Image (tube, rainbow, N blue to C red):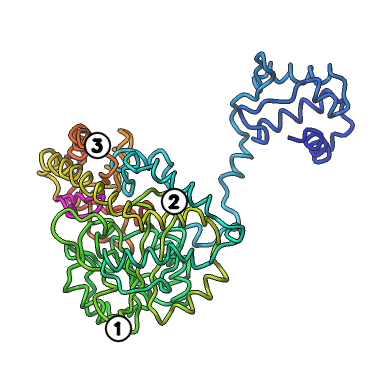
Amino acid sequence: MDFALLVSAYADSHGHNNWPRQRLLHECLRAAIRNGTLAAGTRLAASRVLAEELGMARNTVLYAYEQLASEGFVSTDRRGTVVATVMASPARRAARGAVIGLSQRARQLRVVPPDAARMEAFAPGVPALDHFPMTLWRRMLERALRSMTVTQLNYGDPAGQPELRAAIADHLRAARGVACDASQVFITDGTQNSLDVCMHALADAGDTVWIENPGYGGALAAARGAGLAVAGIDVDDEGMAPSEDDWLLRPPRLIYTTPSHQYPVGSVLSLRRRHALIAAARTAGALIIEDDYDSEFRHDGAPLHAMQGLSDDAPVLYLGTFSKTMFPSLRIGFVVVPAALTDTFAQMRAQSSARGRVAEQLALAEFLYSGQFALHLRRMRRLYRQRRDALVAALERHLGSVATLHGGSAGMHLSLRFTDARINDLAVAAQAQVHRIAVNALSAHDTQGVSGWKGLMLGYAQVPAEQMEGLVKQLAAVVHLAAYAAKQFKTPYQPARRTSGRSRR
């Protein structure tokens, strides 16, 4: 903190240059503490140091500090003077709360939960981080750093490191049936970044994009950020279900879908609907954005091949991420584009993408090529299946009378749909948070209008199996109380329309 500048600015702005120096310093520090310029916990300069910096007598500084202490603005200990916790002034609070100069899109943004809430029980999208092979990863990262050349210290390839692009292409061909080579793979900072790129690159402002309803709030935010017209397409137990009227009355330029494990409901898009969607999109001249969310974790039956590889030259962009299979802070995702779009995408990424994290990309390429990624996935599938089974058993025991389960055959979350649509799932989610249970309300994910899905989304990957029973009992108490309250209403409860649900990646 430059105290000389602080005092000078205060004197000039308030016209107090003629005040006695004791009063000027005291009033200046007092105002800075009240308006938050000097935050609680800030350690003020020693009186001798501050006196030298300001060209004042030390007694002048001591007087100001003593006066502030008597008023409760600072406290003293053996190490000096510390700013105390005080309420900000009304003017400062109003300024902080004002929304000035924001776009309409920014005003519609949802409130993001605090980081602590994202680690609580049943928070969706959180993998079992304590089971990640950190020691092995650290060794690979160290090898990558040692192998880097001087050239690789410069800005990296905007499309991503060639080694990683090739490794991802090999993995996708073998594991997901994706028809691609390395030139079609573009590295991004995660699924949200991939969505932003696709929405801006593949459609113009005003074009229509289909998004599942209920659906992923991040896709909705990306579409709105690109100025696209959003059409919510209803979801059922077979996934996205567009009607003939949808194709006729609001034909899309882009179609966003999560076919492997729908977010948030959890349904799997049937093979029949996959083929039908590809054929209809081809006829309409639309492009499908296939977010292969949770495809790596299939608990019951064999997984369906990715839509991208179901037909030759399918009009599909395939999105993937390592945030759930490895760890979120890695921030590495990818887009597989049709061969006809590779040159255009390469030019666009060269002009707009961040270039860096070479060491992480090289380490990830080794993780894939060495077989350690596949081994880690097998371990996580077993672990998540055990945790899924424990959660399902507990939910059926304690909530089977008021809700039905959906989406438990794959992924890291399942959904609980209330049999009574009058139950306020938003209120249930808020009350569960009091017990440190971070469930999502399904109605909070409504894309456009009311989807008809009322219930909860529960992530189970990070919750040990032995804790499921106790946590579900706490959640059941909240739900049963809400169900009892709902019976007092004669008409179904209709929540206020929300712009999006909680972000997952």
Label 3, label 1: how many angstroms apart (C-alpha)? Answer: 45 Å
Q: Are marks 3 and 1 in contact (CB under 8 Å)?
A: no
**Which amino acid is tagged 1?**
Arg
Image quarter where the N terminus lies is top right
Residue 395 is one of the magenta-drawn residues: no
**Most foreground residue, 216 or 261:** 261
Kindly give the residue lying farthest to the bottom in the view shown: 283
Image disc number at residue 424: none
Span colored in magenta: 405-420
- Identify residue for label 2: 330
Identity of the residue drawn at 65% across and 25% down: 83
- Identify residue for label 3: 464
Q: Measuring from the top left, give residue 394's x and y in whole percent.
A: 14, 39
Q: Measuring from the top left, give residue 57's x and y in whole percent.
A: 87, 20
Question: Which quadrant of the view contains residue 74?
Answer: top right
**Which amino acid is tagged 3?**
Pro
Kindly give the residue lying farthest to the top in the view shown: 78
Q: 417 above or below 271?
A: above
**Which amino acid is tagged 2?**
Leu
**Most foreground residue, 470 or 242:** 470
Foreground: disc 3 or disc 2: 2
Q: Earlier in the sequence, mark 3 or mark 1?
A: 1
Foreground: disc 2 or disc 1: 2
Image disc number at residue 282: 1
